[in-house]
Image: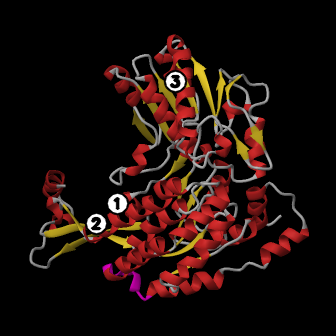
Amino acid sequence: MSNTHSIALEITSATSNSADDAAIEQFDFTNVLDGLNKYFDTRVTFSMEWRKSQLHAMAKMLRKNEAAIFEALYKDLGKCKQETTLAEIAFLQADIKYALKHIKKWMRPIAKSTPLMAKPGKSFVYPQPLGTVLIIGAWNYPLQLTLSPFVAAIAAGNCAVLKPSEMASNTSALIAKMLPEYLDTKAFKVVEGGKDETTALLQQPFNKIFYTGGERVGKVVMRAASEHLTPVTLELGGKSPCIVDKTADLDITANRIVWGKWLNAGQTCIAPDYVLVEPEIQQAFIEAMKRALEAQYSKEPKSNKAYGRIISQQHCQRVASYLDGQTIIHGGQIDIPERYISPTLVLNPALDSPIMQEEIFGPLLPIITLPSINEMFAFINKRADPLAAYIYTKDKEIESQFIEKVSAGSMLINDSNMFMLNHELPFGGVGASGMGRYHGKYGFDCFSHEKTVMKRTFSFENNIRYAPYTSFKSFLLNRFM
């Protein structure tokens, strides 16, 4: 089996056959990459004026196509206008605004100190675009998670190929339509399609691959990138824990967990995946959660316009299967043809059951009772590092222990998801939840090479480093190095 075909096989878990081979071979993106590389070599993308013009063009694209964006995301995920505005359009506009405000500073060489042996001289770090990059977007936030890393790639001066998720087909088609109308078509290309197109793209020698998605395909992307020694950023996921201790304000806590968990019908990589509570507050917390769910999504979430849908019937069936044999204490209504699962609370599932072994990525929330905070920390640390971790507490000592003892890509005290709004903070995973980070300056750095430069003059020649070596020269070298 060829390496190309093996990658396609892993992406889809399909069975190898000759039809697959033929389909893969028909996609050859060599000419696309060559064209982008040639344009990059003209150094047009290096100028601040060009970068700013492209970012302004993207902002205009989002403004002018707002109605079409609303429609596409409603068709793909049942997203209401307010949710699309908050988590997709406004997020991207803020991303662009922040980059435009700081890009001049980011592009400047950064002066560094110079050791005595190298004086007189100057040292600095020069941020340089990587070249042509590949950005593979995700389906759960199909606009934001495709275009946010793209904002960073533009700010850093790169050319790019965008591969939106085929699962969010309406949003993918809209991105493919919009971008050529507003942005530089010599610098950017959009490739639509599924596993064959993705497989063919992964065979190309890009200067960077940025992938958002699941761990399994993340491994495939990393293996493919290794063939060309291409650096990768992997934004994955995992089971993000949430601790609620007995000092927390339960009504505020429940409201914030409900918002963070059931945004996008639970299909959010940083959503709380399970909640750990102490026995004495278990019932009070459950009642607070039920009140918050009814307040935010009404008694009939299926007819509530604020509540979205699962991306596909296949994913709906997968999430629904996690409820087999579980103790459902709220919700549990399922309509596979409508891609609907109601907001559902599950009490103390078996730890070896699929709902506790897999990232849920849907509107189910297990509530697990453990006798102490220390046991909660141990429970979390026995599992793979999550993308996010949450705690609700008024106890400063517990808060400090949580920060010190728990490993996660990002942490939030007394709220859910809100760190995503701060462009001063890096976003990225650790361990199985991903590698690399972006947002704000960290996104610019993600798509840049920090080239070191030292400059010396001819005005002074220090010969102690030259042969022939003497004990006196060795003494001076040891002193001044």
Q: Position of residue 384 (x, y in %)?
A: 58, 35
* Circle number at residue 288: 3
| Nearest-to-viewer mark from 2 and 3 | 3
Q: Which residues are magenta?
A: 42-48
Q: Is residue 247 visible?
A: yes
Q: Which residue is mark 2?
A: 102
Would residue 45 be counted in the magenta stretch?
yes
The vertical placement of 215 against 243, above or below, is below
| Nearest-to-viewer mark from 1 and 2 | 2
> Which of the pair 237/320 is nearer the observer?
320
* Circle number at residue 441: 1
Sooner in the amino-acid sequence: mark 2 or mark 3: 2
| Disc 3: CA contacts within 10 A as few (<14), some (14-19) or many (>=20) | some
Q: Position of residue 397 (x, y in %)?
A: 33, 20
Q: In the rendered structure, are the residues bearing label 1 and label 3 in contact, judged by CB atoms less than 8 Å apart?
A: no
Distance between mark 1 and mark 3 Cα atoms: 39 Å
* Left or right position of 303 against 82: right
| Disc 2: CA contacts within 10 A as few (<14), some (14-19) or many (>=20) | few
- Split into 4 quadrants, where in the image is the N terminus? bottom right
Q: Quadrant of residue 459?
A: bottom left
Q: Amino acid at mark 2?
A: His
Q: In the rendered structure, are the residues bearing label 1 and label 2 in contact, judged by CB atoms less than 8 Å apart?
A: yes
The vertical placement of 65 against 240, above or below, is below
Q: Is residue 468 visible?
A: no
Distance between mark 1 and mark 2 Cα atoms: 8 Å
Q: Secondary structure at mark 3?
A: helix
* Left or right position of 434 against 111: right
Q: Quadrant of residue 406?
A: top left
Q: Secondary structure at mark 1?
A: helix
Sooner in the amino-acid sequence: mark 1 or mark 3: 3
* Residue at the spot 65% in from the left edge and 63% down from the top edge: 165
| Disc 1: CA contacts within 10 A as few (<14), some (14-19) or many (>=20) | many
